[in-house]
């Protein structure tokens, strides 16, 4: 089973998706093609690789792009195809290219003094990888009703007396709202931190899935179905509807909610891929994986950094020894 490589119709060179121009660009003759042109040139296809070390599943268009796992840096092996139930419904194309992602990484690292140099060495930084992560998107209509009792108080003074009048009101609020693009990471493995930390995305830019967008990037396949996510998502939607109805009640000194009801209609789930620049580092001493992740659309950054204990010890000694010497000198003279 061979990987798909998109070739330039003009010169036969490799085509890669270019975030800056939102086109598919030839590496050699620099010809550019739109998504519509790509659809006419190529038939969608793809391959799925599975990392034997950490279990991450990666979709890659070129065999050379899959020579290491972006998460644990170990070799990966061919496992199947992206088709059927694993074929995404939509995709958010990369808008941030590698050069800009490296610039964001450099600014993020600036001022972080006690990180091992191996984390940001040239060899390590070269492993910064554009990855499409899998997400489930949820949408529905939710109907809500809320019954409450509100009170208003008016106070005034008559002679030496302070009088207060309390008025009670029956309150009812109800309505229907459309919910869309509630995103949930579709990974249960350790690398889900990378996918969750860079949210949210600008969902209005979602495109129908096309394999050409994967050219020059990796993409990880989901390992969670929406049925496992549904209870938490529906609970969040219901709470949002209740809070929205509650926010419509104003002008009362106190409100006591007596009854509330929400009903979800027409729930829909869509499987999509969204862009992340990812860099991971495995500390051989502790066998723990640290990471940097950047939203490939908005530039939002998250990460977990290792600590160079040797440099921290040097700092401690540089501060502690002079302080100890000063304390001993004071003690001596006293």
Image (tube, rainbow, N blue to C red):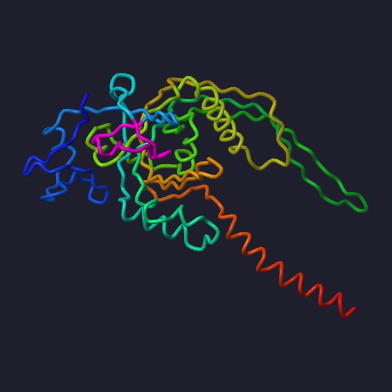
- Taking depth in this image into account, of 151 and 196 the one nearest to the observer is 196
Kindly identify the residue that appears in the image at 62 percent across and 37 percent down.
Answer: 249
Residue 74 is covered by the magenta coloring: yes
Q: Residue 105 occupies which quadrant of the picture?
A: bottom left
Q: Residue 280 occupies which quadrant of the picture?
A: top left
- Taking depth in this image into account, of 237 and 198 the one nearest to the observer is 198
Kindly identify the residue that appears in the image at 31 percent across and 55 percent down.
Answer: 99
Residue 306, image x, y percentages: 54, 50
Q: Is residue 168 left or right of residue 6?
A: right
Residue 13, image x, y percentages: 12, 43
Q: Is residue 43 above or below residue 298?
A: above
Residue 168 is covered by the magenta coloring: no
Quadrant of the image containing the N terminus? top left
From which residue to which does the magenta span run? 58-76
**Dominant secondary-structure state across the stretch colored magenta:** loop
Q: Is residue 62 above or below residue 27?
A: above
């Amino acid at each position: 089973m061979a990987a798909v490589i998109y070739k330039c119709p003009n010169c036969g060179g490799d085509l890669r998706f270019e975030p800056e121009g939102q086109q598919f660009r030839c590496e050699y003759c620099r010809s550019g093609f739109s998504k519509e042109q790509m659809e006419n040139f190529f038939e969608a296809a793809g391959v799925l690789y599975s990392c034997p070390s950490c279990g991450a599943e990666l979709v890659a268009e070129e065999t050379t792009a899959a020579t290491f796992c972006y998460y644990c840096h170990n070799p990966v092996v061919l496992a199947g195809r992206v088709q059927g139930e694993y074929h995404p419904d939509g995709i958010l194309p990369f808008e941030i290219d590698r050069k800009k992602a490296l610039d964001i990484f450099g600014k993020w690292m600036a001022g972080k003094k006690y990180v091992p140099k191996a984390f940001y060495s040239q060899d390590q930084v070269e492993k910064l990888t554009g990855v499409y992560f899998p997400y489930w998107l949820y949408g529905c209509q939710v109907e809500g009703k809320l019954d409450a009792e509100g009170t208003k108080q008016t106070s005034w003074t008559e002679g030496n007396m302070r009088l207060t009048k309390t008025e009670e009101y029956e309150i009812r609020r109800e309505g229907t709202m459309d919910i869309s693009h509630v995103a949930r990471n579709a990974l249960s493995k350790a690398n889900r931190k990378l996918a969750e930390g860079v949210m949210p995305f600008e969902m209005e830019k979602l495109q129908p899935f096309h394999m050409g967008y994967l050219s020059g990037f990796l993409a990880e396949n989901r390992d969670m179905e929406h049925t496992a996510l549904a209870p938490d998502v529906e609970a969040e939607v219901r709470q949002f509807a209740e809070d929205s109805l509650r926010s419509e009640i104003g002008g009362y000194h106190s409100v006591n909610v007596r009854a509330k009801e929400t009903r979800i209609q027409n729930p829909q789930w869509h499987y999509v891929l969204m862009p992340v620049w990812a860099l991971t580092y495995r500390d051989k001493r502790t066998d723990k994986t640290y990471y940097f992740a950047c939203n490939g659309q908005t530039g939002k950054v998250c990460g977990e950094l290792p600590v160079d204990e040797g440099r921290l010890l040097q700092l401690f000694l540089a501060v502690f020894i002079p302080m100890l010497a000063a304390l001993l000198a004071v003690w001596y003279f006293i």
